[in-house]
Image (tube, rainbow, N blue to C red):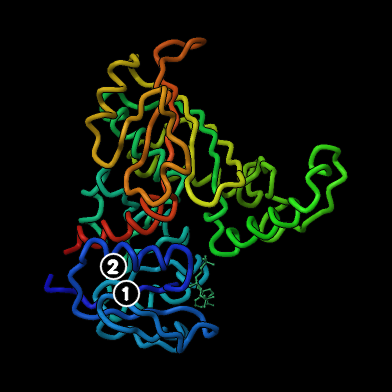
């Protein structure tokens, strides 16, 4: 492909802004850049390394002439507008959940299942940020021994809920800090919930996403179905719990995995040390969300063998959900298309 004409849809959002930053950092070869968002942002001028670009109203934008469109404006916008873009000849890389379950749409973690992108018919889906981070560690182990069972607990940052999530955490933290004693005595005043079910400042919400089938949230279902699709094995038993924590950026996952054949911790550590895009941190320097913020690598630590049901591996992974969890992977998929 010659240098593509590229559009970022949702360019003013948390992921869209990170997409722009990453395109710049990676010196992405562009013939033209267009930025789109809601009518609220239309007319805003954003300085980029390719010059100043005026944000267009997605609803009024003509997709003609766009070669690659990176969509991150929510699933309903993807459902509504992505087909128009593909019909006009664009390859759409969609960060929403809109098409991830569609059989003919590849779900690609760059560096893990790049081959799947070859079969695309216009749309490629970017996996959920928690699943993506976990797959960076699960895939090398799966390729070695065949992943059969996994219990996964996520610790998801507020930026997974976009700019509103981040603003809510800052706002609630400020409000709650006005009366520190109340945080201990329990007399705190409700700071509101914003996009979450309960306050997130100084708190933990054992329910990330919205309740869907069988008492599990949509986030938890994504971990089940996307893991199976990415690893190309339909019978992996996944038991997920998705938790929201008062962290700005960086989703952590504590996972225990069992395989068709036993894996010991030394083998797991070696495989993960060799895996692209992954850094293994020693136990005396535990990788945290703060360490992951702004990093393109997913960080793994606490790698250990299971005790109660031997032969499995428990580990911790954490990654910047706006980068590898979303924008970086979308840009890497665009690079695959080049
Ligand atoms: P806008 O900033 O104009 O609202 P985030 O997840 O960080 O909140 O970002 C969501 C992104 O999706 C933003 O760029 C936002 O644009 C965009 N968006 C939200 N609603 C619409 C819509 N109805 N049409 C087009 N873009 C939208």
Numbered tag placed on residue 122 in the rendering: 2
Residue at 84 percent of width and 53 percent of height = 189
Is residue 288 shown above or below 65? Answer: above
* Mark 1 Cα-neighbour bin, 10 Å: few <14, some 14–19, many ≥20: many
Please name whichever residue, 95 or 29, is drawn nearer the observer in this view of the structure. Answer: 29
Is residue 66 in view from this perspective? yes
Disc 2 to disc 1, how far (Cα)? 6 Å
List x then y, in percent, for residue 84.
Answer: 37, 79
The circle on residue 16 is: none
Quarter of the image that includes the C terminus: bottom left
Q: Does the Cβ of the disc 1 residue fall within 8 Å of ligand 1?
A: no
Query: Is residue 223 at least partly visible in the picture?
Result: no
Q: On the rendered structure, is 35 left or right of 97?
A: left
Residue lying farthest to the left in this orientation: 2
Residue 86: percent from the left, percent from the top? 32, 74
Name the residue rendered at 31%, 27% in the picture: 141
Q: Is residue 327 above or below residue 60?
A: above
Q: Residue at x 27, y 70 (%)?
A: 91
Instruction: Give the answer, above or below, for where 25 lies relative to 303.
Output: below
Q: Quadrant of residue 239?
A: top right
Q: Nearer the viewer, residue 41 or 294?
A: 294
Residue identifier under label 1: 86
Q: Can you tell which quarter of the image residue 286 is in? A: top left
Assign a secondary structure to mark 1: helix
Identify the residue at image location x=66%, y=49%. Answer: 211
Circles 2 and 1: CB atoms closer than 8 Å:
yes
């Amino acid at each position: 492909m010659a240098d593509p004409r590229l559009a970022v849809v949702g360019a003013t959002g948390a992921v869209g802004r990170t997409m722009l930053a990453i395109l710049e950092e990676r010196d992405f070869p562009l013939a033209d850049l267009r930025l789109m968002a809601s009518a609220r942002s239309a007319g805003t001028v954003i300085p980029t390394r390719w010059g100043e670009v005026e944000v267009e109203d997605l609803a009024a934008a003509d997709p003609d002439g766009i070669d690659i469109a990176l969509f991150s404006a929510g699933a309903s916008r993807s459902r509504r507008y992505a087909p128009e873009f593909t019909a006009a000849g664009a390859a759409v890389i969609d960060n929403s959940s809109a098409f991830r379950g569609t059989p003919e749409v590849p779900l690609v973690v760059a560096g893990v299942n790049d081959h799947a992108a070859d079969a695309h018919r216009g749309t490629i889906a970017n996996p959920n940020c928690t699943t993506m981070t976990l797959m960076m560690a699960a895939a090398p182990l799966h390729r070695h021994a065949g992943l059969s069972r996994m219990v996964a607990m996520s610790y998801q940052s507020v930026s997974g809920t976009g700019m509103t999530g981040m603003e809510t955490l800052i706002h609630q933290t400020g409000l709650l800090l006005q009366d520190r004693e109340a945080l201990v005595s329990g007399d705190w005043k409700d700071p509101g919930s914003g996009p979450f079910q309960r306050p997130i400042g100084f708190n933990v919400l054992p329910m990330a996403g919205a309740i869907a089938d069988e008492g599990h949230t949509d986030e938890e279902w994504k971990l089940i179905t996307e893991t199976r699709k990415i690893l190309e094995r339909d019978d992996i038993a996944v038991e997920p719990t998705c938790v929201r924590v008062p962290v700005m950026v960086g989703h952590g996952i504590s996972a225990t995995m069992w395989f068709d054949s036993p894996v010991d911790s030394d083998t797991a550590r070696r495989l993960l040390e060799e895996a692209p895009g992954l850094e293994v941190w020693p136990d005396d320097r535990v990788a945290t969300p703060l360490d992951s913020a702004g990093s393109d690598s997913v960080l793994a630590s606490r790698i250990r063998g299971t005790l109660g049901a031997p032969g499995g591996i428990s580990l911790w992974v954490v990654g910047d959900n706006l980068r590898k969890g979303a924008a970086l992977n979308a840009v890497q998929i665009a690079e695959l298309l080049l």
